[in-house]
Amino acid sequence: MATDIESAVKNIIVEKLGVDESDVTTDASFTNDLGADSLDTVELIMEFEKEFDLTISDEDAENIATVGDAVDYLSEKAA
Amino acid sequence: MSARRVVVTGMGALTPLGLSVDAFWEAALNGTSGAAPIESFDAEKLRTTFACELPDFDAEDYLDAKSARRMDPFCQYALVAADEAVRHAGFDSDEMPQDLKDRIGVIYGSGIGGMQTFYEQTDYFINSGETRVSPFFIPMLIPDIASGQIAIQHGFRGPNHAVVSACATGNHNISDAFRLIKDGTIDGAVCGGTDACVTKLGIAGFASMRALSTRNDDPAHASRPFDKHRDGFVMGEGAGALFLESLEHAQARGATIHAEVLGTGMSADAHHLTAPDPEGGGVKLALNRALETAGMNPEDIDYINAHGTSTPLGDAAETSAIKQVFGDHAYDLNVSSTKSMTGHLLGAAGAIEAIACIQAMKHNVVPPTINFEEADPDCDLNYTFNEPQERELNVVLNNAFGFGGHNTSLVLGAFEG
């Protein structure tokens, strides 16, 4: 299950941020490493909500800064 | 600072006739129609099922995928045309010093803005929920984002704004840039207009007004300005851009000068939402003001690139205004409407047609009004029907009028040092 979530998360990031899949590592930060600006990060959160059919509060969203953060959060919530 | 002369040193065009100034001009002299059944969406149920779409345009040929995805097509078009104009002026913005770029403005508008973006996001809002609207919705929608994006791409930090005046947008933005350079506020500017309204909602809206031709069985002959059987305009899409500079700035860097901007006249009809004043009162004011600011007499004008959209009322009213201002000379000068070939590019029209004017002067040939078959007694000028006409062109005039009663007339001259 975790692998499915991880690959779905990575696909969204690759598509929305226009980055190479090889750059989407667990530790990669959306803003520092993957070139996301404030609007991109909002869009990413919305895509995660859509893909996993859940609602991410603004407080939770603020703590999702890296690929790993997103995978961990979504693995827990979507489980 | 005393008034400075303003010249054109760069041009960029993305049109249904071709995706560069050269391609556009070659097709225009050949009398090519850009109209065809709409390919980008299913138009079968609309009143009008054809338009002048850009041929084979792929934004990713010009922009990286991520940037392209964040822009409505109207903004993509603007960036492509602006980039051609900047390069044509001999600039590589990566190599320009910032203090130079700080004195270059971007005055660039759109008549409509992100119509397709508005449509898609509204659909999303209604059908997927109020919290599902894209964070890029507003920055993709607003008509001024094109001038912002052009500045971001090139680092130009002079005045930056977008005049929005429907189909007069292109001319208005050129006029504002001209005045800012003339009065010494800036040394140069990218200016012009763009629109991407060949969308299902866009065509449906203009068709509901009965503004569009419904010659669905013969699109190539639908745009026929000044012909007796004209029945409305044909929607086009694209963008036009000029790079304007003060004469001294252009000469100091040895730039090629393509034309001079001599004057601009602006007015309102103060008459009706969309219908032109049949007496041409507002247009007459714009024409007279254009001549006055350029210091020209009516007899000095060799050619008028008409607004000439191919609507029954508009073409007759424009003809009437030209006759009132130019008197007997109205029959000596050449008039033509390149919209007969490009369709009506709305906010881009004034900019594309300014380029047609400049090319006409450079080559001393008037581009034709195609599709003429039968004379309309209300339209009795020399409209350069069907074939281009060679003629020495020194001073020309470019008309653009918009819904809301906005009238603009731009005077352009062949450059004489």
Image: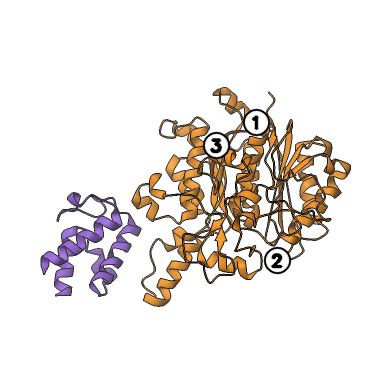
| B258 left or right, relative to B39 | right
* Chain assignment, label 3: B
Please provide percent x and percent y for residue B304.
74, 43
Q: Which mark is residue B258?
A: none
Q: Secondary structure at mark 3?
A: helix
Provide the secondary structure element on which disc 1 rests.
helix
Res. A55 in view? yes
**Protein chain holding label 1:** B
Q: Are marks 2 and 3 on the same chain?
A: yes
Question: Which one is nearer the viewer's eye here, B101 or B58?
Answer: B58
Place of residue B150 in the rendered image (x, y in percent of width and height, measured from the top left): 47, 45
Disc 2 target residue: B273
Splitting the image into 4 quarters, where does residue B70 fall?
bottom left
Q: Which residue is pictured at 52% across the width and 69% down the height?
A: B44
Q: Residue at x 45, y 40 (%)?
A: B154
**Disc 3: CA contacts within 10 A as few (<14), some (14-19) or many (>=20):** some
Whether residue B98 sits left or right of residue B24 in the image: it is left
Q: Which tag, 1 or 2, sits closer to the chain's start?
A: 2
Residue holding disc 1: B362
Label count reads 3
Chain A: what color?
A: purple
Viewer-nearest of labels 1 and 2?
A: 1
Measure how far apart labels 1 and 3 are at the Cα level: 13 Å
Q: Which residue is mark 3?
A: B22
The amino acid at mark 2 is Leu
Residue type indicated by callout 1: Lys
Kind of residue sitting beneath label 3: Asp
- Disc 2: host chain: B
Q: Is residue B163 visible?
A: no
